[in-house]
């Protein structure tokens, strides 16, 4: 396996670049990109790919978070900057607790089943994001039908 990794260092670099670019652009954890690429291209077992992805995401998440906080990306109408910090901290605490639960179960599921669960989750989240939700229309003051015709830009012409 080490020969494969050493021989394909450039593939790992490209996986990292793709994950970092999409992670910074879309706010997704790079694992959505890294795990499938490492499983499909490098033939890593699912659990190993997830572990490598989580390890690589630490610096990725730190850099992305700093960049978001430096810009105006974290401005939320009706909330102070401190409130958004508190929101971030509460989500982080919940994520750490959830990680303890998730890694417990991941250790008890075989690689093939975990791969099916991972792929199914990605598909379901993608479908969920495409379905208009009534509360999104209310938040923008539009009818639910208008949600399906949005341009993907906020009120200031910036992409979401």
Image: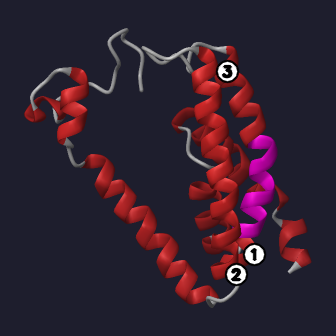
Q: Which of marks 1 and 3 is nearer the N terminus?
A: 1
Q: Residue at x 58, y 23 (%)?
A: 83
Q: Provide the residue designation for mark 3.
A: 69
Q: Provide the residue designation for mark 2.
A: 45
Q: Earlier in the sequence, mark 3 or mark 2?
A: 2
Q: Can you give x and y, in whole percent of width and height, for residue 46 in the image?
A: 65, 78
Marks 1, 3: nearer the viewer: 3
- Disc 1, SS: helix
Q: Provide the residue designation for mark 1.
A: 48
Q: Which residue is drawn at 81% across and 64% down?
A: 8
| Mark 2 surroundings: few (<14), some (14-19) or many (≥20) residues within 10 A | some
Residue 159 showing in the rendered view: yes
Q: In which quarter of the image is the N terminus?
A: bottom right
Query: Which segment did they paint magenta?
Result: 50-60
- Disc 3, SS: helix
Q: Do the residues labelled 1 and 2 touch (CB within 8 Å)?
A: yes
* Magenta-colored segment: predominant secondary structure: helix
Q: Are marks 3 and 2 in contact (CB under 8 Å)?
A: no
Query: 140 or 129: nearer the eye?
Result: 140
Return the residue found at the far top.
Answer: 156
| Mark 3 surroundings: few (<14), some (14-19) or many (≥20) residues within 10 A | few
Q: Are marks 1 and 3 in contact (CB under 8 Å)?
A: no
Residue 13 showing in the rendered view: no
Q: Residue 124 carries which label?
A: none
């Amino acid at each position: 396996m080490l020969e494969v990794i050493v021989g394909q260092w450039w593939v790992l670099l490209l996986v990292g670049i793709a994950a970092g670019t999409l992670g910074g652009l879309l706010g997704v954890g790079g694992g959505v990109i890294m795990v499938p690429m490492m499983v499909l291209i490098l033939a890593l077992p699912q659990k190993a790919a997830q572990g490598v992805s989580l390890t690589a995401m630490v610096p990725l998440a730190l850099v992305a978070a700093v960049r978001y906080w430096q810009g105006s990306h974290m401005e939320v109408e009706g909330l102070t900057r401190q409130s958004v910090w508190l929101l971030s901290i509460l989500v982080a605490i919940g994520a750490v607790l959830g990680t303890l639960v998730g890694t417990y179960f991941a250790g008890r599921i075989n690689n093939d089943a975990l791969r099916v669960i991972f792929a199914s989750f990605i598909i379901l989240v993608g479908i969920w994001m495409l379905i208009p939700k009534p509360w999104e229309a209310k938040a923008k003051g539009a009818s639910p039908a208008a949600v399906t015709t949005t341009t993907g830009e906020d009120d200031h012409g910036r992409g979401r």
